Each structure stands twice: as C-alpha cells, then as structure tokens.
C-alpha cells in the first residue's frame, strides 16, 4: 500500500512540474490582479494595473521606440515632431496615430492616458501636474551614449510590457554595430579621419555628447572632443583651422525653420577664414541626416553607419 501511495505522490509531483515547465515555455504569464511596477530614471516607482493601452509620448525618441514596440492602437498620441522628416525616422508609421501633442499638461490630461513617457529634460512642474491629476508618468534619463540608448529601450519595453520586443530591438542594434566595427577595424589608427559636426549655430558635439560616442563607433576622430570642447560648447573659426578636420558633417535640418541647409553649406565652403582647412580643400562637406545624428532611439545606429560611410566610402559605401 505504501508503495502505491508513494507512486501516486510521484505522479502528482511530475504533473505539477510539467505544468510549471509548460507555463514557462508558453511565454509571459497572465499579470496578477495587482498589476506590476516599474522604477523610472528618477527612482520613482510607477504602479500599473495592466499593460498600458493609451500611451502618450512626449519626445521624438519615445515616439520612435514606441512604434517599434507596441501596436498603433495602444498609442494615444505622438509628439508634434513625429511627422517632420527632418528629425523624425517614423513619418510613415506616424500616420497610423492621428493625435499630436506638445508638453502641455492640459492637453495630455484631456487624452486620458494610462501612461505618459517623457525624458528628464522636460520640466519637473509638468511631471508633477500630471501625477497630481492621477496620470501615470514614466521619466527616463536622456541618453548620452549608444549604450544608454539601449538601456532606455529596454526600460521602456519593460514599462509597456514588451520586454522581448525590446531585447530584439537592442539585438538588431548590436548586430549592425558589430558589422560596422568589423569594417572600420581595417583602418589603422593613424589613418582615422578627423570629422567636425556643424549645426546652423556652428561646430559642436564635443565630449559627453551622443555625437562623440557615434564617432567612436564609426571609427573616426571627433575634432571637437579632440580640441577639448564640451557637449554644448561652440568652436571658433580659429579653433576649426587648428583642428583641421578632414570632413565637415553638414546639417540637413534647422529646428527654427529659418536657415536653408544648402545655403549654410555654401557659406561654410566659401568662408575666407576656412580655406586652408583640409575639408574645404578636398570638398568634403558631407550632409548627414539630422534625424539619425540626433536620434535617441534605435535609429542612432544609422548615424554610425552614415559617418563611417562618409569617412571610409571604399569600406562602407556612401
């Protein structure tokens, strides 16, 4: 009798173990009645009763990340920049979302979102107004490196309940970066090109900027960082001459809408003070899409390829 009881218990335990294993293999388990929690970039713990289905994005970066992670019917609104091809990489996908917003508490609250995503450079007053109105707000740290962009993607994927899609998105970034790294590895250090980023305000993108990290991944030398410039400092013409970059990376978009990028390029090309610079003498004023260079989403990898291709066209093509 004891043998039969032991055998019965054994079968029951096997059944329980098998059920548990199958449950783990079948994907994410149903959320509990308590929902789930997510800690944002400021340490605030956000409690969500279920996967959000009315998400509002308040940055172009989260616009782009969201559209890769969730179905369009879960997005209540994107930013007003989503349709601007000069800075947005998702103009076509954005057409699926009819509503656009700016950083207005009143406008956001009226949409009755169950999640608002915004970067830490948005005003704290806005965050507090939304939370005081009962709106769930997730604040993420604005990235300054490509690795930090990956962390933001993973964090946002977690808060919207799409961890696996987030992992796949990051894996795609890593694969493309590895392909570029393999190509530029053939360039000796002494032959690495010196590049200088231009905006309509002048040379910029020094140490601490995402541009500086993009340059490292592209196998080029960032002239502004080499000169000891910080993230938001602007170079004088005298400094540009001293750096003597091989390539000027020219803007394709102006946030103010007042400057024509082509005219700006010609003004730089014909500037008497810059005629001794290698980039001018070799006519290497190469436009790089601002929507790639300033991306804080998965599309930042395209900037790495753009710049590597501009510097080493024989390896990556233009």
Image: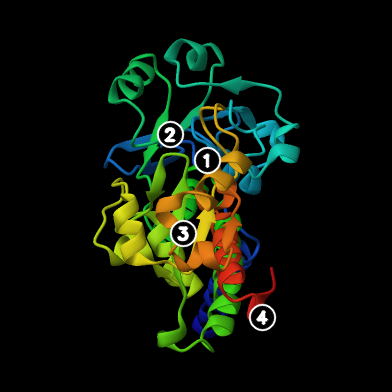
The residue identified by callout 1 is 62
| Mark drawn on residue 314 | 4
Foreground disc of the pair 3, 2: 3
Among numbered discs 1 and 4, the one appearing first in the sequence: 1
**Secondary structure under badge 2?**
strand
Is 241 placed above or below 29 here?
A: below
- In this view, the residue in front, 233 or 274, is 274
Marks 2/1 in contact by CB < 8 Å: the verdict is yes
Marks 4/2 in contact by CB < 8 Å: the verdict is no
The residue identified by callout 3 is 275
Foreground disc of the pair 1, 4: 4
Real-space CA distance between mark 4 and mark 3, rounded to the nearest whole angstrom: 26 Å
Q: Position of residue 131 (x, y in %)?
A: 35, 21
Q: Residues within 10 Å of mark 2 (few under 14, many from 20)?
A: many
Q: Residues within 10 Å of mark 3 (few under 14, many from 20)?
A: some
- In this view, the residue in front, 264 or 111, is 264
The quadrant of the rendering that contains the C terminus is bottom right
Foreground disc of the pair 1, 3: 3
**Secondary structure under badge 4?**
helix
| Residue at 71 percent of width and 23 percent of height | 98
Real-space CA distance between mark 3 and mark 2, rounded to the nearest whole angstrom: 44 Å
The residue identified by callout 2 is 118
Among numbered discs 2 and 1, the one appearing first in the sequence: 1
Among numbered discs 4 and 2, the one appearing first in the sequence: 2
Q: Residues within 10 Å of mark 1 (few under 14, many from 20)?
A: many
């Amino acid at each position: 009798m004891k043998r039969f009881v032991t055998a019965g218990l054994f079968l029951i335990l096997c059944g329980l173990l098998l059920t548990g294993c199958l449950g783990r293999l079948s994907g994410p388990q149903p959320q509990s009645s308590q929902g789930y929690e997510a800690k944002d970039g400021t340490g605030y713990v956000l409690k969500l009763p279920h996967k959000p289905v009315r998400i509002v994005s308040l940055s172009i970066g989260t616009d782009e990340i969201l559209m890769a992670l969730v179905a369009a019917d879960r997005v209540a609104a994107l930013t007003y920049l989503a349709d601007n091809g000069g800075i947005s990489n998702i103009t076509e996908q954005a057409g699926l979302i009819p509503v656009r917003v700016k950083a207005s508490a009143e406008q956001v609250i009226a949409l009755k979102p169950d999640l608002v995503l915004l970067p830490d450079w948005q005003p704290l007053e806005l965050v507090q107004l939304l939370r005081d109105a009962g709106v769930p707000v997730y604040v993420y740290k604005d990235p300054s490196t490509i690795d930090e962009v990956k962390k933001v993607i993973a964090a946002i994927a977690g808060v919207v309940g799409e961890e696996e899609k987030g992992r796949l998105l990051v894996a795609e970034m890593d694969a493309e970066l590895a392909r570029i790294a393999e190509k530029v590895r053939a360039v000796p250090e002494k032959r690495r090109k010196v590049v200088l980023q231009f905006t309509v305000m002048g040379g910029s993108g020094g140490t601490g900027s995402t541009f500086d990290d993009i340059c490292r991944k592209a196998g080029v030398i960032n002239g502004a960082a080499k000169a000891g410039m910080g993230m938001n400092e602007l170079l004088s013409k005298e400094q540009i001459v001293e750096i003597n970059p091989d390539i000027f990376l020219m803007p394709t978009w102006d946030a103010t809408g007042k400057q024509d990028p082509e005219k700006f390029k010609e003004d730089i090309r014909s500037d008497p003070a810059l005629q001794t610079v290698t980039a001018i003498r070799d006519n290497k004023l190469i436009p790089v899409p601002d929507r790639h260079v300033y991306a804080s989403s998965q599309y930042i990898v395209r900037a790495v390829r753009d710049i590597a291709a501009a510097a080493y066209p024989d390896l990556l093509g233009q």
